[in-house]
Image: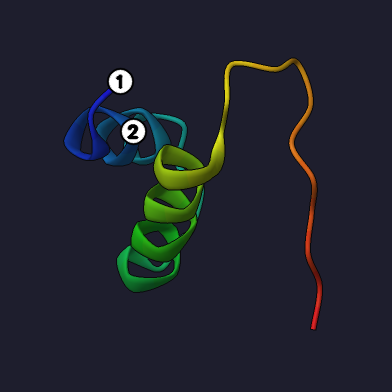
Amino acid sequence: MTREELFEKLREAEIPFSEDMLSEVFDYMKDNLDGGDTIDVISD
């Protein structure tokens, strides 16, 4: 799924989001997911 497709799905679902925030998350996921079934959540 591209970033634009993700944003469009969130808009269709009327989920409020910040594109800047989601861009960071999207980039992190793209760079760090290794095909596993889990995503580690890192909090501040």
> Which amino acid lies under the numbered mark 2 shown in the image of this protein?
Leu
Q: Tag 2's secondary structure?
A: helix
From the viewer's side, name the closer residue of 35 and 18.
35
Q: Are marks 1 and 2 in contact (CB under 8 Å)?
A: yes
Residue topped by disc 2: 6
Residue projecting furthest to the left: 4
Q: Name the residue under label 1.
A: 1
In this rendering, position of residue 2 left or right of residue 34: left
> Residue at position x 41%, y 48% from top?
26
Q: Nearer the viewer, residue 24 or 18?
A: 24
Residue 31 occupies which quadrant of the picture? top left
Q: What element carries label 1?
A: loop
- State the quadrant of the N terminus: top left
Q: Image check: 25 left or right of 1?
A: right
- Looking at the rendered image, the disc whose residue lies closer to the viewer, 1 or 2, is 1
Quadrant that contains the C terminus: bottom right
Q: Counting other residues with Cα less than 10 Å from the Cα at mark 1, is it few (<14), some (14-19), or many (20 or more)?
A: few
Q: In which quarter of the image is residue 33?
A: top right
Q: Residue 12, located in which quarter of the rendered image?
A: top left
| x then y, percent, for residue 7 | 30, 41
Question: Mark 1: which amino acid?
Answer: Met
Does 6 sit left or right of 38 as displayed?
A: left
Question: Is 22 situated above or below 15?
Answer: below
